[in-house]
Image (cartoon, rainbow, N blue to C red):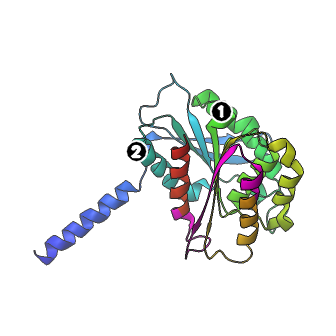
């Protein structure tokens, strides 16, 4: 086999791998959400399933940090939809309208002003109604999923503790639960009795060598889920040998697999 033939095969293999990791852009719709709640403009992407039609209702996965993670998640959802013979899921990427820490954190930290409660209102009062009206998203809590990593994962847990009627499913990767003296864990305890009656799905993940004090509060939250939230199907995974950023794609794949296995 000639050296040039080997090079050609390598190039073709690389191109195939790249295509497999891309989502078909013809199935992506984009718009800007101009919020009356906080005055910010959020770029929104919606990945439609194959065979999308206005004649049915669709489950939704809301992806934070859209610029970083939307394409990867959309492609993984497409793969799993094919594997599980489903065509009823929209992937909604929410871009940044403010500094991400401003929107995702419930308390001030560094550049973030701690406006997570306002961002919840943006999603609840403005974004979700647009998805229901213009993209036929289902209006049931159990059909909505929030997915986030790091500060985005913290925001997902904040929704779980303080706004449990918004989402029925949570895919939270390496959530920064240490922020604000573990304020989200304090909120969980405060709201526990009211929240225990709900059901849904919760995927929690981290890297095995997370930096700083990331792991202890995540481990604490894992035990809380298992002990007090019997109505939730939950799964916890550690990506051994991987750090905060290095574990993200591995855990994204596992989170999406968990989601489909639970449908």
**Disc nearer the start of the sequence (2/1):** 2
How many labels were placed on the picture?
2
Residue at image position (78%, 68%) is: 178
Is residue 100 visible in this depiction of the protein? no
User: Crowdedness of circle 2 by 10 Å Cα count: few (<14), some, many (20+)?
Assistant: few
Give the image location of residue 66, x and y in percent. Answer: 59, 53
User: Which circle marks residue 17 in the picture?
Assistant: none
Point out the stretch of residues depicted in magenta: 224-250
Does residue 118 appear left or right of residue 258 in this picture? right
Depth check: 42 or 221 in front?
221
Does residue 250 appear left or right of residue 177 in this picture? left
User: Which circle marks residue 83 in the picture?
Assistant: 2
Name the residue that disc number 1 marks. Answer: 130
Is residue 129 visible in this depiction of the protein? yes
User: Crowdedness of circle 1 by 10 Å Cα count: few (<14), some, many (20+)?
Assistant: some
Give the image location of residue 89, x and y in percent. Answer: 52, 38
Quadrant for the N terminus in the image: bottom left
* Callout 2 touching callout 1 (CB < 8 Å): no
Q: What element does badge 1 sit on?
A: helix
Residue at image position (87%, 58%) is: 186
Q: Is residue 3 above or below residue 227?
A: below
């Amino acid at each position: 086999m000639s050296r040039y033939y080997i090079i050609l095969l390598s190039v073709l293999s690389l191109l195939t791998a790249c295509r497999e990791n891309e989502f078909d852009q013809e199935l992506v719709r984009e718009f800007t959400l101009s919020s009356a709640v906080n005055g910010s403009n959020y770029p929104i992407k919606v990945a439609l399933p194959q065979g999308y039609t206005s004649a049915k209702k669709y489950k939704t996965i809301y992806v934070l940090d859209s610029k970083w993670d939307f394409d990867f998640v959309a492609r993984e959802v497409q793969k799993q939809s094919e594997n599980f013979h489903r065509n009823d899921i929209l992937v909604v990427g929410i871009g940044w309208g403010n500094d991400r820490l401003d929107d995702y954190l419930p308390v001030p930290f560094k550049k973030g002003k701690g406006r997570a409660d306002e961002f919840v209102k943006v999603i609840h009062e403005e974004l979700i109604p647009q998805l229901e009206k213009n993209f036929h998203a289902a209006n049931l809590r159990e059909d909505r999923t929030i997915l986030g990593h790091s500060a985005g994962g913290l925001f997902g847990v904040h929704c779980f503790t303080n706004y449990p009627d918004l989402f029925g499913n949570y895919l939270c990767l390496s959530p920064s639960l240490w922020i604000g003296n573990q304020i989200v864990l304090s909120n969980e305890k405060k709201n526990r009795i009211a929240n225990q009656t709900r059901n849904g799905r919760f995927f929690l993940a981290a890297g095995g060598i997370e930096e700083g004090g990331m792991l202890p509060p995540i481990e604490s939250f894992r035990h809380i889920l298992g002990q007090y939230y019997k109505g939730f199907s939950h799964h916890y995974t550690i990506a051994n040998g991987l750090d905060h950023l290095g574990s993200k794609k591995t855990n994204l794949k596992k989170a999406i697999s968990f989601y489909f296995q639970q449908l």
